[in-house]
Image (cartoon, rainbow, N blue to C red):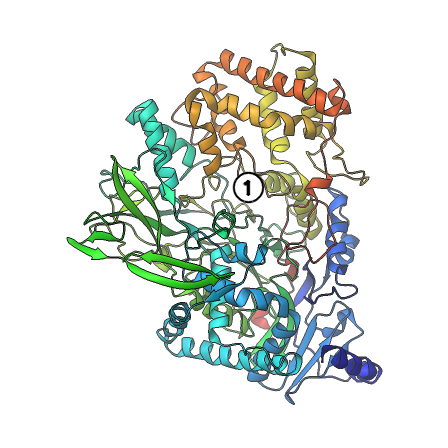
Amino acid sequence: MRRRLAFIVLLLAAVLAGSAGAATAAPKDYSATALNIIPSGQLGDFPIPEGQDEQAKMYDALTPLFDNVAFRDLGKYFKSEKLNPNTDGPLVQEIVPNPDVTIRRDRFNVPHVKSKTYAGGIWASGWIAAKDRAILLLLARTAGCAAAVDAPGITAIGLIGAGQNFVPSAQTEAEVAKQADALRARGKEGRAVLRDIDTYLSGMNAFLAEDNPLAEPYDRNDVFCVNSLKSQFLGQGGGDEARRSQFLGGLIDRLGSPTGWQAFNDLRQQTNNGSPTSIDGKFPYAQLPKNGRAGSVILDPGSYEPRSSVQGPLASTLSVPTPRQTASNTLMITKKKSASGRPLMVGGPQVGYFYPGFTYEINMDAPGLKWRGATSVPFPGYLLIGRGQDFATTLTSASGDVVDQYVETLCDSSDIKYFYKGECRDMEFFDAGTISGDPVQFYRTVHGPVVGYATVDGERVAISSKRSSYGKDVVDLIFNRRLSNGTVKDPKTFFKAAAQTPQTFNSFYIDSKHVALYTSGKLPIRHPQVDPGLPTKGTGQYEWRGFLKKKDHPQGVDPKSGRMVNWNNSVAHRFGSADDEWARAGSVQRVTMLNRNLKARKNRKGKWSMTDLVESMNMGATQDVRAVVTVPLLRQLLYRTQPPTQIAGDMLEQMALWNQAGGSRLDSDLDGEIDAPGAAAMDGAWDRIADAVMGPVLGPQLDELATLHARFDAPPAGQFAGWYQYFDRDIRSLLNKDQASPFRLSYCGGGDLAQCREDVWNAIAEAGQELSVEQGSSTPADWRADATGERISFAPGLFRTTMRYANRPSGIQQVISFWGDRDKKKRR
């Protein structure tokens, strides 16, 4: 059917191309610059359609320009995001069984929808979702259900990546269906979302009836489940207190209580007055207790045993944690600091590199729906990331602390009975379904699924997990509906819209006057004697006490610095990081590279152009954060000291030259090797340097710490986590440098500068001995690190195109600004 439909379209192409110019004019477009790129492309068929990698090639071609991006390159390596459908013609019309709807595809296969009715626009988006993401829907419509019920030990992304099919049980289907009630509870607006979902499903099923009439029709649960996948993957944070609690237990056992607690508070970096932030002001949340921690529990070291809900041979594969994506970044400039006099934005979300991609594009023109940008299969005709007529929006993951683990006191000598409010209760058995015939089953307490067992002072306990957004993920769609239907008109209405979602994101806004940010999420208010980084006593006395008010969420408009930059760092001071986010509030972070790149590109009047933003982003995409922020401090530490070997001294010199050249991991000549020899020296020496710095205090717990906060989140990963943050704060104290939030303890050399220098030099020298053998040369200038292994590939392997390593948004990346004073313009 699909081939026959394509043949009809081709036969009609000439006639339709001639009539395209006569179509109704596009909506009024106030954008000055409007560009985007989605590297996974628009279509999702297999075999791979010809030309499907065109956007990937454009995305990849920008990377080697590094710090030499010209204005002409913007239109060359990004495509149009204008509302006018003719910007990337010729257009080819698609045959659809809806007389109110016209869909025309441009040369990138982006669908441009023109509908006579609001419902027709929603219907068209369903048709497009079913056509352009049939393979993804096949996997995600059921895998997402595992996320919706928080099945322990597995993730929806993990299921898709492993090519496993989760078959939901009747109990799971019934649980997921309750999300409709969460929408109904939101009144008129929630009911409108449900109507849109039903209209959207009619469009999906209309395509299914033509393409695959024997397939099971899509229903509301499919939308709910895929939206839950998005929440689990990108829109939640926290829920790892048990592992970190037993780590604290080990510190206390080795170092004693006061010192163990000091080390724990240093390493978790829960708040930090010296961290780079994105907005002005302080937004206190999830602060550490001031009057004791009676509601928190410290587990016995090494006692936590996670439990997976899937049994059999798949348990070990699917229980491996799937890291949340943390490469999203956004750079925005205020009107006052823009060289053009218009606010500027370059930014987008990181959703990994998949084919079919999780995002695809629509240009929507229907009554009440005027938008263009990225959407996804759980969005019923709504914008996810993109622009309206006179504003644009994007997001980064905020990973707010919306998941808490509870310690359940067991009773009656049973693993499935627990005390709650003075009563011994039975845990609820939940039969979630099957994966490859293996049952997916778990127990639940009043707090949520049981995710493992541990001991406290030798007594066995259960660990359960509670998520504030559970059963409410779909409420997120109210936000996206407001983005799409004209409700959002300015920062104030944008904040009101973003506050609707229970999922936790940093949502960004730009129009012709302002740049703005709002951090969303259903953020629990904890008992004052509960430490947000430790598991909570589950006996009933220490339950949540409501949720953070909308006005208290981090939010800001037009910061004084003139720039609003975020790369998954803390958005504001005193806003506590989630327990599983020990990298979010470091004094140096990836975002430090973007800020430094921007600072170096200000013109004489202290202003930035759009090219400056793109160039700063593109530099950061291949820079190694250690080369930029660690190497200068490493040189200061070792200044005027004698290296133990010539090789060690030469390694430091190569690292310094790498820093001076910009710190990029580029393989500019595509010979499979990173150009800068300093990259090989740093890669080979880093783990030893990190251990040398932290070892005097951490000792046998070094590797355990690395499971909680990696020594380095190495490329092709995103460099989000890394002990370069610990190096910075500790060495600055050792060198008596001023800093806003120094560590409580001294780590390197046990606080002795001479010993620290000796330990670090020895670490470099030991690495040099190994590298000389591996590289076949004792001259570090000859060394090269492997670049081929860092190339980006698209999971799960259907799409063969690969790209250079680039640490930048993948779901969509926009380059956008708007003309004029929109208050003086009549909006359509």
Residue nearer the viewer, 445 or 741: 445
Q: Residue furthest right?
A: 14
Q: Residue furthest bottom?
A: 99
Q: Is residue 807 left or right of residue 152?
A: right
Q: Quadrant of residue 300?
A: top left
Q: Position of residue 519 (x, y in %)?
A: 45, 55
Residue 646 in percent (x, y) is at 69, 12
Q: Report whether 424 appears left or right of 404.
A: left
Determine whether 559 is above or below 482 in the image.
above
Whether residue 156 is situated above or below residue 682 in the rendered picture? below
What is the count of numbered marks?
A: 1
Quadrant including the N terminus: bottom right
* Residue 485 image position (x, y, % from top left): 53, 75
Amino acid found under the numbered disc labelled 1: Phe
Q: Is residue 144 visible?
A: yes
Identity of the residue drawn at 41% across and 36% down: 268
Under tag 1, what secondary structure? loop
**Extreme-left residue of the structure:** 422
**Quick one: 349 or 426, which is closer to the camera?**
426
**Mark 1 crowdedness (10 Å alpha carbons): few <14, some 14-19, many ≥20:** many
Q: Is residue 227 visible?
A: no
Residue shown at the point (53%, 16%) measured from the top left: 759
Is residue 313 depicted above or below 441 in this figure? above
Q: Position of residue 626 (x, y in %)?
A: 60, 32
Seen in the picture, residue 265 relative to 398 is either above or below; the reply is above
Q: Residue at x 76, y 70 (%)?
A: 87
Residue with the mark numbered 1: 720
Q: Determine the image quadrant of residue 655.
A: top right
The quarter of the rendered structure image containing the C terminus is bottom right
